[in-house]
Amino acid sequence: MIASKEEQLMESLRSVIDPEIGLNIVELGLVRAVEADPDTDKMKITMILTTPFCPYGPQLIEQVRMVGNQVIPGGVLVEIGMELWDPSMMEEGAGGDWGLF
């Protein structure tokens, strides 16, 4: 079965690792939404950071943009959401190495 653009993009974003935590941004639940723009080939990624003043925030955002642009022919737009991150947003089982769950 052929994966949708959204699924392909989400899978590719697993290569973006939060350097402080050592988990990828999808596992951490930082990617909150992936939406196709119906008028263009672009896709919009809404993401959050683990803390509002994450020192790696700019690098993570740029990595998301670079990875997304490699997968989506029309490119991606990365927006930062206003939601506050908490460990319950992580994928099931992702926090096991941390002893969180």
Image (cartoon, rainbow, N blue to C red):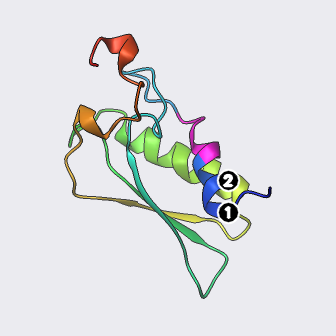
Q: Quadrant of the N terminus?
A: bottom right
Q: What residue sits 72% from the left and 57% below the top?
A: 3
Q: What residue sits 63% from the left and 47% below the top?
A: 67
The kind of residue tagged 1 is: Lys
Q: Is residue 63 magenta?
A: no
Single out the residue that lies furthest toward the right.
1
Report the side of 84 relative to 92 (left or right): left
Q: Quadrant of the C terminus?
A: top left
Q: Are marks 2 and 1 in contact (CB under 8 Å)?
A: yes
For disc 2, the marked residue is 8
Task: Classify mark 1: helix, strand or loop.
Answer: helix
Q: What residue sits 67% from the left and 63% below the top?
A: 5
Image: 64 above or below 80 = above
Image: 70 above or below 98 = below
Query: How far across and down, in percent of the image, does residue 49 sit?
Result: 31, 43
For disc 1, the marked residue is 5
Report the side of 42 relative to 79 (left or right): right
Q: Nearer the viewer, residue 19 or 92?
A: 92
Magenta extent:
11-16
